[in-house]
Image: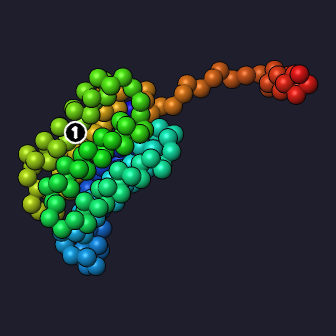
Amino acid sequence: MNRPIRTTVVFGLLSALLIFPVAGLLADRWGGGLGFKLALWLDLALYSVLLVRWSKARLLPALFPLGLLLAAALWPWSRAGFFLLGLGVLSWVRSGICFQAPPLRLLTAETIAMAGGAGLVALLAPGSALTWALAIWLFFLIQTFYFYIMPGLAEGPAASPAQDPFEAARKEAEKTLG
C-alpha cells in the first residue's frame, strides 16, 4: 500500500473521530449548522494540504478554491450547495492543481471517487453523530480508489540510481572548471 492510500485511510479515520469534537467547539462560538460546515471545511482544507504536499505543488493555487468553499460555508442557506461545492473543490484541488494526467483518465478517476463517496454518504443518510462519522470515514475510503486508478501520481519522480561519490565530485569539479 503506497503512502497516499495509507495516509488517506488514516486521515479519514481521524476525521471521523474528530469531526464532532471540532464541530462542537465551533458550534459553541458560531452555532450548530455553521460549526459543522466549518469543521467539514477545515477537514477538507487539511486534506488539500496533504494532497499539495504529495504532489509537490504550490499551496497558493489551492487557496482560491478553499476560500470559495469557506464563503459557501459562511453562507447561511447553503447546506446542500456546500456539500456539492465541497466535492467540486476536492476534485479541483486534486486533479486540477495537484496531479496532472490525461484528461479522460482524470475524469474517470474523479467520477468514481466522487460519485462513490457521495453515493455512500447519501445511502447512509447520516442523521446522528455515529452515522456522520461512519459516512466521513467511508467517504475517505472511497477516495483511496483515486490513487488506485491513477497509480504513481503521488509517488514523485523515480529516484536516480546511487552515484559514486567520486564520480559526483569529478562532475562538480569539471562543471566548476569548465
Residue nearest the observer in this picture, 69 or 49: 69
Residue nearest the observer in this picture, 82 or 118: 82
Q: Residue at x 8, y 52 (%)?
A: 125
- Mark 1 nearby-residue class (10 Å; few <14, some 14–19, many ≥20): many
Q: Residue at x 35, y 50 (%)?
A: 65
Left or right: 159 in relation to 105: right
Left or right: 156 in relation to 25: right
Does 122 sit above or below residue 115?
below
The residue indicated by pointer 1 is: 114
**Numbered disc 1: secondary structure:** helix
Residue 14, can we see it? no
Give x and y (percent) for residue 99: 41, 34
Does 178 sit above or below residue 135?
above
* The quarter of the displayed image where residue 37 is located: bottom left
Does 47 sit above or below residue 100?
below
Q: Quadrant of the N terminus?
A: top left
Give the residue type at disc 1: Met
Name the outermost residue toward the bottom: 29
Q: Quadrant of the C terminus?
A: top right
Q: Residue at x 54, y 27 (%)?
A: 157
Q: Residue at x 27, y 29 (%)?
A: 107
Left or right: 93 in relation to 82: right
Give x and y (percent) for residue 27: 24, 74
Left or right: 90 in relation to 164: left
Does 12 sit above or below residue 111?
below
* The quarter of the displayed image where residue 154 is located: top left
